[in-house]
Image (tube, helix red, strand yellow):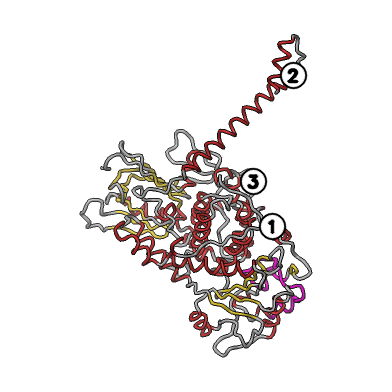
Amino acid sequence: MASASTKYNSHSLENESIQRTSRDGLNRDLGETVPRLPGETLITDKEVIYICPFNGPIKGRVYITNYRLYLRSLEMDSALILDVPLGVISRIEKMGGATSRGENSYGLDITCKDMRNLRFALKQEGHSRRDMFETLTRYAFPLAHSLPLFAFLNEEKFNVDGWTVYNPVEEYRRQGLPNHNWRLTFINKCYELCDTYPALLMVPYRTSDEDLRRVAAFRSRNRIPVLSWIHPENKTAIVRCSQPLVGMSGKRNKDDEKYLDAIRETNKQNSKLTIYDARPSVNAVANKATGGGYESDDAYHNAELSFLDIHNIHVMRESLKKVKDIVYPNVEESHWLSSLESTHWLEHIKLVLTGAIQVADKVSSGKSSVLVHCSDGWDRTAQLTSLAMLMLDSFYRSIEGFEILVQKEWISFGHKFASRIGHGDKNHADADRSPIFLQFIDCVWQMSKQFPTAFEFNERFLITILDHLYSCRFGTFLFNCESARERQKVPERTVSLWSMINNNKEKFKNPFYTKEINRVLYPVASMRHLELWVNYYIRWNPRIKQQQPNPVEQRYMELLALRDDYIKQLEELQLANSAKLSDPPTSPSQMMSHVQTHF
């Protein structure tokens, strides 16, 4: 059935490593046909025809567990394996009806969140399609069936605890905070001031908790301006929040105006506070109709407002859909550039990076502290603050530093992961779905291409994060905010993605990393310097040559392995030698032998 010898192996990078090593917690007996994690149970298996878009129909057996769909080819000339976490599935549709007569026209069509679709043909008799459809629907969308997400069943154990990576007090202390201008407030300890903010907030020293309550009443979702990062030398700050509730009548709030002045005055050298509104100006004006808006010049005298023209979640969702259309299953090489341009994806990447560069430059120059917001302050705001911090602070370019950045600016500050990704939820057409975090990781990848020695982590690290953004294997990206995670006891009941990564860090390290302190990175955000991330977006297509590791990088890795081998041999020789030296030599020749070996 399959053409030629099929070696198409549809794993994610991280899944490939799972199959090769038990260090990732995999439990695999020799007699087993499907790899299983601790806590993973087999639900059913069925013989199917996989309609491979690259090699035609392939007969195989599909195994469905409470975590993954696993297909193994039954054909002698095919080594195909599909390993798909159920969390990746966005939609399951029945293909064909009882009267379908065409070959392989009756079965299931599965749409995934990671840029691929899967089609399986099944026999019409014996309810085989109905059974597989019901099993997949039940375990791919557990929330719709009152079942737990797999992260709550996962029993993997690692030597390191990823939940301890981020401690807000320690991270503020690393930045030299609190100080005489900024204080830590516990006003949100029980999430009463703002239920989508973290419990601990850094605010201007001279503002009282009562002031904060009054400011919260004038900010969308009560998301008041709070500090994200402070420059170690010039003390200018990056502050984040949501839009002011100005409305059509142009309401003002003296407490909010006074509060922004207090932020500006935390640095005596600054006469102005720069406000970057991530939205296009026309959208910000339109938001007035729904009670939102922006800071006007007449109300905020000591502030300068700039719009960054980054589009909303709906525009980004449609743009990614267009990318999927041109990369899967087939790439039309003859119209590739015009097709890519028509998606506007790289244009959006450019605008996000350009906005972050402006934030970083303003803070690095010491000209002014910066306030960043969009509408609610949990999508474009998180992109801008985290990318600017990555450009400004080399600590965030290390593996653990980047984990802290994601935990802080995205997870604890309430990016709505559950709504944007739809973990365990069957409503694939939900208007809240959007690839905002994927876009951020894409921007990080663009930076790593332009500064190949600046980041401790490699491409595999970024792809692994994206794979587990969807997989529901770890608790890291579950739920919309810190208060929801606390209610569900996520750190106690689930494993952190950082546990798995930090347990095997070598796999995620960039061999060219050169640690530099206080170097600011300014990527070039022109379209000429941006490219589609082929190893992520087109990785499922075996006909597109993957961007192979640089031969210099491969040689460097070989030399590192050789060095480690020599060090090990040397240590063994020294151990053997110290054992010999403990016995007194009996002849001059023996004595000479000892001296030479030791030397």
Residue at 51% x, 80% y is 281
Residue at point 56% right, 37% down?
A: 560
Amino acid type at mark 2? Leu
Q: Nearer the viewer, mark 2 or mark 3?
A: 2
List the residue tagged with mark 3. Answer: 160
Report the number of numbered marks.
Answer: 3
Q: State which quadrant residue 340 falls in.
A: bottom left
Instruction: Please give the name of the residue rendered at 64% of the width and 61% of the height, measured from the top-left corner.
Output: 486
**Front residue of 16 and 549:** 549
Q: Residue furthest bottom?
A: 249
Tags 1 and 3 touching, CB below 8 Å: no
Circle 3: residue type:
Val
Asked if residue 44 can be seen in this view, the reply is no
Residue 130 occupies quadrant: bottom left
Report the residue that reaches farthest toward the left: 101
Quarter of the picture holding the N terminus: top left
Badge 1 crowding class, 10 Å Cα cut-off, few under 14, some 14 to 19, many 20 or more, is few
> Residue 581's mark?
2
Q: Is residue 210 magenta?
A: yes
- Residue neighbourhood size for the residue with mark 3, other residues' Cα within 10 Å, grouped as few (<14), some (14–19), many (≥20): some
Q: Amino acid at mark 1?
A: Asn
The quadrant of the rendering that contains the C terminus is top right
272 is within the stretch colored magenta: no
> Where does the image place residue 335, in percent across and percent down from the top left?
30, 61
In the image, is residue 77 above or below residue 125? above
Q: Chief secondary structure of the magenta span?
A: loop
Instruction: Give residue 180's position: percent from left, percent from top.
Output: 79, 69
User: Helix, strand or loop at disc 1?
Assistant: loop
Residue 447, x across and y down, in percent = 53, 58
Mark 1 or 2, nearer chain start: 1
